[in-house]
Structures are given as structure tokens and as C-alpha cells.
Image: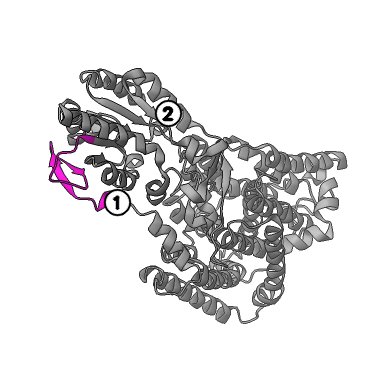
């Protein structure tokens, strides 16, 4: 409960407030409102559902924006009433924040570290250590900004992802009380405080809407403060201006309540993946939350839906619920990739149980503790221990010596997918670049050229080389695209030299064609390739087409990561077959390269074998989101065979001359 009879402390404001508009009984802010507690429930429940079943409420994340408004309204109310009564104390304000926030946070970080010991791989555990540090220091939003976007698949594997919002709140409440009291000390004008609050809110909103980097807008505090500012401006108008909707008719307040609820709920249902958030659409639930709070407790939805006892109960435990639900889900996503909906529902149910227990047996007792000074010191000491724990996990690289039940399976998956074939192959220099080949003492008559999508064929080529008695060479460089002089330098010049070299009778080129089609240079460079190839009528050219993959767009994880398909509870591999990815850049890339090169080359398509019947067996073939497993290609990549059969025939013909 919020109390206004705050005893003055060493840092309390001493002079009474003379410029405040007197508050009438009708306009005086309510100290406890069940409807706002219920509004917390309306904010947290969509977040939970979105995290577990995003397709059910695609905009459930707007619940966090509603939380920001509520927090801004309630916390600024404490500050403003303290200023109004000349009793605001930094010491007491932060003491209350520490007792409210820290106990649950320490418990959560302890649990996350303990669970990660048994579930996470060393690199994942080391990353968790960094996140524990960032969460302890309330800078998790900055940590995440340096790593990933909130809506990426990798975000599902971050047990402390959700603490970005707590960090933004605490960053704001470190700065805002200082601004308010500093303005009051210098000007003795609550009007200046209001102007400052409005400037912060409007400036933050402008920064948010003008940002072209959505991750920046999502995580950076200055692009989020406007949401807290919306609640702050409402609180300011009630405290210092005497604004209250209680002077309006009941029908008007009912209308505000209905409109506010609809503005919160409807965007959650109709938002799409392409919707920019935070952005203009975020204004709708934010303003909706303001309307609901302003409508007063006796408004229609406020007194019915929001004051309904189940809603107020969920609202009471909403902080605990928000804190605990996500780590449970994240560890479930990591440990059991094929978790069924019933398992996810069970995890959410468990989060309710934990939240209630923590609320009644940890949060409340500590909040009511009479020896506040001692409690605060112990809690701060606990935070220091959490910081030390996170740093230890990070510095030890995630304790790689831990015995993990699933480790053998994961290691075997990694071993199967190594690039050792190409990377460890013998090499010789040609026109300033290395050519990988099983026999560096003889110049190869068959050359493979491309990016990593070509390098994965080395082991199969090596096997066929032994079978057909054809020496081959391979030039492969990540990001390589055809014969691009500007970016590839020596590689591009070497390729042109190879095309002209009469010792080479067969050339194979391959690339992640679809990864380049959105670049203007794809068409500029590709247009120069056909004339170059046509300078050698005796050169047989094959183009290795691509197979289905999902583009990494905006940080969105691609089609497959085999490490995400190992059950870390049982150690079993989890198979996965899925249709062609919805994004068809791979297909359009194949079509474009065939259109541009035309009959200057012969085309080889691995898709019918990798994805028969337009269904891809991810575990069987894929190394990650866009590469195949080199070992699987070595065993079953039969589409490569005709290249060597042609090369063997060409060499036989040469010898017979």
C-alpha cells in the first residue's frame, strides 16, 4: 500500500509547497485502488500467453507497455505527494524500492544460475553469467541491445531476457526523483516540474518514433521513458492541477473505461510481425491504460472486470509472476525442444504457484519488516553476491568441466558438423590465394569456387576424387559472390585466371545465391559473368544451385540449429521434418542465377534429395539455418557425382589424344 505520511529524513524537502493548487476531496489521488491492481493482471496475463503461445495473442507484449504506465503513475505519485507535503526523502524512496524489487530478484537469479548449471552448455552458461551481472546492475536492456532483438528465436534461449523492462524502470527512477527535487529546490515551482515531465515524455516519444533501429528503440531507455511519462503526467495533473474525472458523469467515466480496455486489448489481437514496436501503434495501449486509470474505480470495467477478485489476486502477484514465468519457459524451450502445449501450460501454472508463494512468504514479510535499515543492507549484500556469482560464471567460461547428461550427444552433433574437411585440407598458392586440394603436387583440372555453401562439399568431392581418379581444387571464402573485384580482391583475380587457364577443363561455382538477390550488385556483377565464361568454349561449367533455407532477417533465426533439437533432460535427439520455409529467397536466387547465366552453364539442384516431397528432414541434413552437414553430404550427396563422372571422362579423352 502507498502511504503519504512519509517522515522527513536527512534529504527531505523542508519548505512547504505554496504554489500547489489545493486538492479537493474529489481530486485527491487514491492511495489504494483495486482497479489498478486488476489492471496489472490485464497487463501480465497477455505477456504470459504471448511468451508461451505467441500465435494466440500476437501482441501480448503490449502488456509491458501497460506496466510502464501503471508504474509511472504510482511511483511518481509517491514523489509528487512527497514534494507537495515537503516530506519526500530519497532515502525512504529508494529503501522502499529495494525492499519491493530486490528480494524476488535475488531468489530468481539464484534459481536461474542453479538451473543453468544442469541445463546449459558452457558457452550458454558463460553468457548467462553476463546476464546475471547485467540484471544485478539493472543494465540488462543494454546487454541485450548489444546481443539480440527481443523477437528473435535466439531470444527464446535467454532466461533473463524479460529483465530488460525492470532495468528501464529502475534507470528511470534513479534519474526522475533527482530531476524533480532539483527543479523544486532551484525554482520552487511545480509548474517547472510539470514542464520537465512533459518534455521528457514528448522527447522520448519523438526519439522512439524517429529511430530507424527497432532494437535500439525497444531496449534503449530514452526511447521508452515516454510510456512511464504518460502515467507520470496523469499523476501530476491529479496532484498539482486537481484534475479528476469524478466531476464527469458516470456515463462519461464508463465510456473512458470501455475505450481504455478496448485500446489495450485490440492491438494485442491485430498486431502483425511487420508492426514496428515500439511505435505509433504502441500509443494505443499506452493511452488506453491512461484512460482506464483516469476513469476512476467506479467506472464500468474498473469496478467489474478489474476489481473482480481473481483479477486483483493476479495483480497482487503480478511482479512475481512476471519475474518467474519467463525463466521457466526459457529453460523448457532449451531443454525440451519438442515440449507439448500441455507442458507449456504446466510451466505457466507452476509460475503462478511460485509467484504466490514468493509474494506471501518473501515479498510481504520483507516489505513489512520493521528494521528496514538492516533489511536493506542485507538485500544489497545479496545483490553483491549475485554480481560475484555472475562474474564467476563468466570468468570460468561457464564451468566447462561440469558433467552434463546430454553432453555426449551434443558433442557428437557438433563433431558431425565440423568443417575439418575443407579447413584442414592441403593447399597450394595460385595467383595469391590458397587452393585446397587432396593432392597439392598436381595442378587440378577440376575447380570448385564459391562461399561456405561450396566448402561444405569438400568431403564428398574428396571421396569422389579417389573413386574417379580426378584431382580437384577448391577455393571457398565466406561472403564470396561470383567474381566481385571490389570485395574479394585476390580471390576475384584468381577466379578469372582459372577461367583462362587451359589446364582447367571443369569449373563448378556455387553460392548462397538467394542471400545476394536483394543487393544491386547481384545483377551488376552477375551480368559480367556470362561473357567471361563464354571466352572458354571448351570449359565445362556447373552451377550448384541452393537448397531451402530461411533468411536471417532482422536477427530472426533461420531454419535449423541441431543443438536446439537435443532433449537435455533425456539426452535424446529430437527429429524434425518441416515443409519448405515460407521465405523463398533461396528459390528466387536459384531462378535469377539460371536466368542470368542461361545456357553458359549446367545446373545441379540438391533440393529433390535434401527435401523430397517439399519436406526437409532438418536433423538428417542440416547443420544450421543455411548449411548442410558436411558428413551427411560426404555419405549421401550423390548430386555431386556427375561432376566427377564428367571430369573423369574429360581426362580420359585428354589421355587418349
- Mark 2 neighbour class, 10 Å CA radius: few under 14, some 14 to 19, many 20 or more: many
Residue 636 point in image, percent of width and height: 42, 46
SS state under label 1: helix
Residue 144's place in the image compared with 122, above or below, is above
- Cα distance, mark 2 to mark 1? 27 Å
Residue 334 point in image, percent of width and height: 54, 60
- Mark 1 neighbour class, 10 Å CA radius: few under 14, some 14 to 19, many 20 or more: many
Residue 59 point in image, percent of width and height: 65, 43
Residue 345's place in the image compared with 148, above or below, is below
Q: Residue at x 65, y 50 (%)?
A: 50
Q: Mark 2 = which residue?
A: 589
Residue 1 disc label: none
Q: Mark 1 = which residue?
A: 421
Residue 92 point in image, percent of width and height: 58, 70
Magenta part of the chain: 420-446
Q: Quadrant of the N terminus?
A: bottom right
Please name which of the two marks, 2 or 1, marks the residue nearer to the observer.
Answer: 1
Amino acid at each position: 500500500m502507498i502511504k503519504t505520511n512519509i517522515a522527513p529524513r536527512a534529504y527531505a524537502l523542508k519548505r512547504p509547497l505554496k504554489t500547489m493548487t489545493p486538492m479537493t476531496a474529489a481530486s485527491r489521488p487514491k492511495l489504494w485502488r483495486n482497479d489498478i491492481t486488476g489492471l496489472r493482471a490485464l497487463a501480465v496475463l497477455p505477456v504470459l500467453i504471448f511468451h508461451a503461445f505467441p500465435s494466440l495473442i500476437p501482441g501480448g507484449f503490449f502488456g509491458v507497455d501497460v506496466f510502464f504506465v501503471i508504474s509511472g503513475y504510482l511511483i511518481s505519485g509517491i514523489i509528487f505527494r512527497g514534494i507537495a507535503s515537503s516530506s519526500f526523502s530519497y532515502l525512504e524512496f529508494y529503501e522502499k524500492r529495494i525492499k519491493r524489487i530486490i528480494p524476488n530478484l535475488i531468489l530468481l537469479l539464484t534459481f536461474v544460475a542453479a538451473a543453468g548449471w544442469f541445463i546449459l552448455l558452457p558457452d550458454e552458461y558463460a553468457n548467462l553469467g553476463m546476464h546475471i551481472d547485467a540484471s544485478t546492475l539493472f543494465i540488462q536492456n543494454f546487454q541485450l541491445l548489444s546481443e539480440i532483438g527481443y523477437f528473435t528465436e535466439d531470444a527464446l534461449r535467454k532466461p533473463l531476457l524479460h529483465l530488460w523492462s525492470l532495468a528501464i524502470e529502475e534507470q528511470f527512477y534513479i534519474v526522475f526523483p533527482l530531476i524533480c527535487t532539483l527543479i523544486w529546490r532551484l525554482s520552487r515551482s511545480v509548474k517547472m516540474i510539470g514542464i520537465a515531465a512533459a518534455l521528457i515524455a514528448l522527447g522520448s516519444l519523438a526519439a522512439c518514433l524517429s529511430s530507424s533501429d527497432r532494437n535500439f528503440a525497444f531496449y534503449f531507455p530514452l526511447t521508452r521513458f515516454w510510456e512511464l511519462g504518460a502515467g507520470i503526467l496523469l499523476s501530476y495533473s491529479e496532484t498539482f492541477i486537481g484534475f479528476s474525472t469524478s466531476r464527469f458523469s458516470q456515463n462519461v467515466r464508463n465510456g473512458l473505461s470501455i475505450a481504455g480496455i478496448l485500446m489495450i486489448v485490440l492491438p494485442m489481437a491485430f498486431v502483425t510481425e511487420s508492426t514496428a514496436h515500439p511505435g505509433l501503434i504502441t500509443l494505443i495501449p499506452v493511452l488506453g491504460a491512461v484512460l482506464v486509470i483516469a476513469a476512476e474505480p467506479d467506472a464500468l470495467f474498473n469496478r467489474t472486470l478489474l476489481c473482480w477478485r481473481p483479477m486483483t489476486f493476479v495483480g497482487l502477484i503480478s511482479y512475481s509472476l512476471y519475474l518467474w514465468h519467463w525463466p521457466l519457459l526459457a529453460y523448457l524451450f532449451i531443454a525440451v525442444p519438442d515440449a507439448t502445449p500441455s507442458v507449456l501450460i504446466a510451466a505457466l501454472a507452476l509460475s503462478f504457484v511460485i509467484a504466490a508463494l514468493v509474494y506471501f512468504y518473501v515479498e510481504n514479510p520483507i516489505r513489512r519488516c520493521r528494521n528496514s535499515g538492516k533489511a536493506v543492507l542485507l538485500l544489497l549484500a545479496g545483490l553483491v553476491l549475485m554480481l560475484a556469482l555472475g562474474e564467476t560464471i563468466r570468468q570460468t567460461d561457464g564451468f566447462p568441466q561440469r558433467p552434463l547428461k546430454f553432453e555426449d550427444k551434443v558433442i557428437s552433433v557438433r563433431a558431425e558438423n565440423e568443417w575439418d574437411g575443407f579447413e584442414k585440407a592441403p593447399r597450394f598458392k595460385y595467383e595469391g590465394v590458397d587452393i585446397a586440394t587432396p593432392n597439392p603436387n598436381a595442378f587440378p583440372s577440376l575447380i570448385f569456387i564459391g562461399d561456405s555453401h561450396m566448402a561444405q562439399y569438400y568431403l564428398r568431392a574428396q571421396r569422389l576424387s579417389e573413386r574417379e581418379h580426378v584431382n580437384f581444387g577448391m577455393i571457398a571464402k565466406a561472403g564470396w559472390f561470383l567474381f566481385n573485384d571490389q570485395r574479394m580482391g585476390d580471390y576475384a583475380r584468381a577466379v578469372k585466371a582459372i577461367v583462362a587457364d587451359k589446364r582447367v577443363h571443369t569449373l563448378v561455382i556455387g553460392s548462397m545465391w538467394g542471400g545476394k538477390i536483394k543487393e544491386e550488385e547481384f545483377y551488376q556483377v552477375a551480368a559480367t559473368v556470362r561473357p567471361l565464361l563464354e571466352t572458354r568454349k571448351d570449359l565445362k561449367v556447373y552451377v550448384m544451385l541452393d537448397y531451402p533455407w530461411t533468411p536471417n532477417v532482422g536477427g530472426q533465426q533461420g531454419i535449423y540449429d541441431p543443438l536446439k533439437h537435443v532433449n537435455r533432460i533425456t539426452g535424446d535427439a529430437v527429429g524434425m521434418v518441416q515443409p519448405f520455409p515460407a521465405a523463398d529467397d533461396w528459390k528466387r536466387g536459384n531462378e535469377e542465377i539460371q536466368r542470368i547465366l542461361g545456357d553458359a552453364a549446367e545446373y545441379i539442384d540438391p533440393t529433390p534429395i535434401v527435401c523430397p516431397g517439399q519436406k526437409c528432414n532438418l536433423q538428417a541434413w542440416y547443420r544450421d539455418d543455411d548449411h548442410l552437414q558436411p558428413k551427411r553430404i560426404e555419405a549421401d550427396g550423390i548430386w555431386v557425382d556427375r561432376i566427377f563422372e564428367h571430369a573423369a571422362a574429360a581426362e580420359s579423352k585428354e589421355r587418349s589424344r
